[in-house]
Image (tube, rainbow, N blue to C red):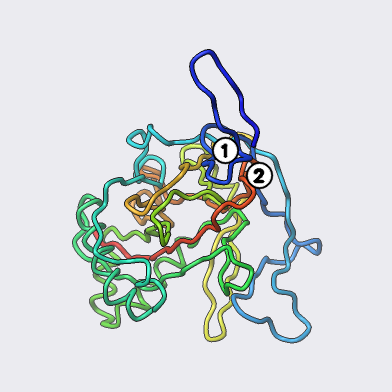
């Protein structure tokens, strides 16, 4: 173990396996590089058809500075930054709940719905349409995503409303009002200890130009959606929330119908997992759940 001694205290460094990386840092983030043949970018969610690549676009790896929002959580909100940090969130679910998709839907979904209704001003109807559990274990089917992206385009968000609101008349009525897609991100831990590895980075929407975002066809077996890749821009302000715990939630806004024309509110937040070089040997693997919601009002 390496230590640094000051006049007042001894600071344990990242060689201690219990160390939680905190404070400003630099990290390598994977951005979008366009297809070499200038074709429209695509990505297959599952196994691609024979002869086609998983995706047809490349990578642009850049080292960027990251600001730690720990102890500055209240400076950011969904309308301005497209993300919001919530603390001291009560829960009745346990770690084992997240071993079963059925239990997640039965026990955790109601908590997420209540949280959104309480935390998102004006919201009056919530539809939770999917969730993903990610574990940094090599054997896990869903790993942390290490590529800067946005989950939805405006067109894909409208398509989601039509997909999940089965009454056509009700769907078209809801599309006339404000609707958002919000990703509710929560760390998972059997011991409720803070995240040590593969934290989530996100860029304040205030610092992201529309030209930084590139629509990508997101190909499912039965339909096509649309996400956005992120081109590097040195003006982007990337952040992370160090040592998130089980009673904290990060709201990530992936689309917002309000302000599409006049830019009156932020629309989306680029995000990605990243490798922090300060992560200690023997650190706990990152485990998390993200629940995606249509939020009306």
**Relative image position of residue 182 (x, y in whole percent):** 37, 58
Q: Nearer the viewer, residue 122 or 14?
A: 14
Mark 1–mark 2 distance (CA, rounded to whole Å)? 8 Å
Q: Residue furthest front?
A: 1
Q: Residue at x 58, y 62 (%)?
A: 136
Q: Is residue 64 left or right of residue 191?
A: right
Q: Which residue is mark 1?
A: 236
- Per the image, label 1 sits on a secondary structure element best described as loop
Q: Nearer the viewer, residue 115 or 141?
A: 141
In which quarter of the view is residue 237 placed? Answer: top right
**Relative image position of residue 131 (x, y in whole percent):** 41, 70
Total number of numbered discs in the rendering: 2
Mark 2, Cα crowd under 10 Å, few <14 / some 14-19 / many 20+, is many
Q: Is residue 291 left or right of residue 87?
A: right
Q: Is residue 60 left or right of residue 285?
A: right
Q: Residue at x 26, y 62 (%)?
A: 296
Relative to 108, say whether 167 is above or below: below
Q: Nearer the viewer, residue 60 or 13?
A: 13
Relative to 148, say whether 263 is above or below: above
Q: Which residue is mark 2?
A: 232
Q: Residue at x 66, y 82 (%)?
A: 47
| Label 1 close to label 2 by CB (< 8 Å) | yes
């Amino acid at each position: 173990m390496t230590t640094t001694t000051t006049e007042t205290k001894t600071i344990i460094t990242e060689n201690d396996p219990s160390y939680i990386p905190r404070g400003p840092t630099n990290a390598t983030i994977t951005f979008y590089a366009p297809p070499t043949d200038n074709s429209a970018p695509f990505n297959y969610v599952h196994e691609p058809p024979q002869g086609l690549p998983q995706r047809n676009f490349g990578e642009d790896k850049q080292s960027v500075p990251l600001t730690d929002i720990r102890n500055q959580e209240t400076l950011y909100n969904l309308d301005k930054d497209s993300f919001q940090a919530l603390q001291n969130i009560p829960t009745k679910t346990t770690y084992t709940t997240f071993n079963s998709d059925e239990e997640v839907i039965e026990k955790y979904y109601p908590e997420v719905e209540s949280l959104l209704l309480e935390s998102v001003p004006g919201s009056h109807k919530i539809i939770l349409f999917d969730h993903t559990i990610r574990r940094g274990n090599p054997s896990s089917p869903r790993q942390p995503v290490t590529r800067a992206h946005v989950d939805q385009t405006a067109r894909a968000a409208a398509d989601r409303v039509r997909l999940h609101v089965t009454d056509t008349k009700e769907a078209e009525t809801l599309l006339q009002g404000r609707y958002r897609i919000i990703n509710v991100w929560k760390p998972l831990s059997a011991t409720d200890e803070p995240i040590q590895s593969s934290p989530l980075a996100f860029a304040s929407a205030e610092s992201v130009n529309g030209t930084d975002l590139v629509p990508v066809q997101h190909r499912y077996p039965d339909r096509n959606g649309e996400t956005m890749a992120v081109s590097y821009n040195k003006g982007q302000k990337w952040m992370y929330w160090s040592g998130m715990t089980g009673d904290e939630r990060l709201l990530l806004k992936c689309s917002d119908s309000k302000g599409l024309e006049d830019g009156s509110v932020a629309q989306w937040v680029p995000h990605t997992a990243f490798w922090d070089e300060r992560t200690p040997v023997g650190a706990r693997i990152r485990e998390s759940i993200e629940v995606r919601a249509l939020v009306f009002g």
